Image (spheres, rainbow, N blue to C red):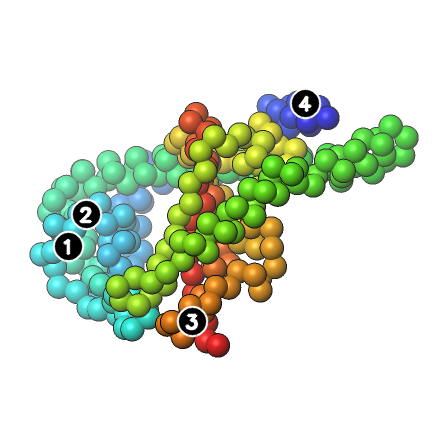
């Protein structure tokens, strides 16, 4: 059955009619924008001159390093006991000037164009994966009479977890709770669990796509597939069981509602990471 579904998904992906003309038009429009210098103008004007930008975004959007930012003035926001360190924010116009001084206008444009191409490629992959997911949903929802009805019944029966996946969910929940704790600032620390030797089928099942063993409906970025998924579903439990008591500290922590699942098929490495939130008694 999985072979049949995988064949159907690959068939859907290879059929250009499933994507329409919108993607080609968007790609042409994006290329035109890049060639006319609109990318640079948008980059300069996307934030008000005195708008504030966080450290993370400053590095990413302006192609700067920590050393570059060390020369600029900043304002601090947030932070405090149980909330982690404050966030440093920089003035947009200062970041633009620093980036131009470091890379030159031509250098910035080159970087913007390269990023634009990466984003277009990513968008196309996401669009193809979305079409595959729709096709997958259509197949799994088939309920015609006769042979098709029997096929739908079989697929529904196979949609549940295997014992291996059930044990993995239980083990992940246990390991996550063991890794929950506190940063030096008193804030809940982030956690990360690694599971080596994970098959494609197991990864697909963990994020609710049991029959997509070829991962056609997922978007691959570099060597990894990355999915944001509900913590309660991934860990196979109710929200009430996502809470851990810290009696000595007099607080409780709850696993964040969303976790990040990363999978590298070439080495069969799976990782699950997330955060926790403080709760009162």
Q: Is residue 14 visible?
A: yes
Give the labeled residue for mark 2.
64
Query: Answer yes or no: do the residues labelled 3 and 4 have beta carbons within 8 Å?
Result: no
Q: Is residue 78 visible?
A: no
The image shows residue 186 at horizontal and vertical percentages of 30, 68
Reading the chain from its start, which is encountered first: label 1 or label 4?
4
Give the labeled residue for mark 4.
3
Viewer-closest of 226 and 240: 240
Residue lying at 32% horizontally and 38% vertically, measured from the top left: 115
Between label 2 and label 3, give the one nearer the viewer: 3
Instruction: Determine the residue located farthest toward the right in the rendered image.
Output: 146
| Element on which disc 1 rests | helix
Task: State left or right for residue 111 relative to residue 168.
Answer: left
For the image, the number of numbered tags is 4
- The answer for how far apart the CA atoms under marks 3 and 4 are is 51 Å
Reading the chain from its start, which is encountered first: label 3 or label 4?
4
| Picture quarter with the N terminus | top right
What label sits on residue 69 in the rendered view?
1
Viewer-closest of 190 and 138: 190
**Image quadrant where residue 35 sits:** top left
Reading the chain from its start, which is encountered first: label 1 or label 3?
1
Reading the chain from its start, which is encountered first: label 2 or label 1?
2
Give the labeled residue for mark 3.
247
- The answer for how far apart the CA atoms under marks 2 and 1 are is 7 Å
Between label 4 and label 2, give the one nearer the viewer: 4
Between label 1 and label 4, give the one nearer the viewer: 4
- The answer for how far apart the CA atoms under marks 2 and 3 are is 44 Å
């Amino acid at each position: 059955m999985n072979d049949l579904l995988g064949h159907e998904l690959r068939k859907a992906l290879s059929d250009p009619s499933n994507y329409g003309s919108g993607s080609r038009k968007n790609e042409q429009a994006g290329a035109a924008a890049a060639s006319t210098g609109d990318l640079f103008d948008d980059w300069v004007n996307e934030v008000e001159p005195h708008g504030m930008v966080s450290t993370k975004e400053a590095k990413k959007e302006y192609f700067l390093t920590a050393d570059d930012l060390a020369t600029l003035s900043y304002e601090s926001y947030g932070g405090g006991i149980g909330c982690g360190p404050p966030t440093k924010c920089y003035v947009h116009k200062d970041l633009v000037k620093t980036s131009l001084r470091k890379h030159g206008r031509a250098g910035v444009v080159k970087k913007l164009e390269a990023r634009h191409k990466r984003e277009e490629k990513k968008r196309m992959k996401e669009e193809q994966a979305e079409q595959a997911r729709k096709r997958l949903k259509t197949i799994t929802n088939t309920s015609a009479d006769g042979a098709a009805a029997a096929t739908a019944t079989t697929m529904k029966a196979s949609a549940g977890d295997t014992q291996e996946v059930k044990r993995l969910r239980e083990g992940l929940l246990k390991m996550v709770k063991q890794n929950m704790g506190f940063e030096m600032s008193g804030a809940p620390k982030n956690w990360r669990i690694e599971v080596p030797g994970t098959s494609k089928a197991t990864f697909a099942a963990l994020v609710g796509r049991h029959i997509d063993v070829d991962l056609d409906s997922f978007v691959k970025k570099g060597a990894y597939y990355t999915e944001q998924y509900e913590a309660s579903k991934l860990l196979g439990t109710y929200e009430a069981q996502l809470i851990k008591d810290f009696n000595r500290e007099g607080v409780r922590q709850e696993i964040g509602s969303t976790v990040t699942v990363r999978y590298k098929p070439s080495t069969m490495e799976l990782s699950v990471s997330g955060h926790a939130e403080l709760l009162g008694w």
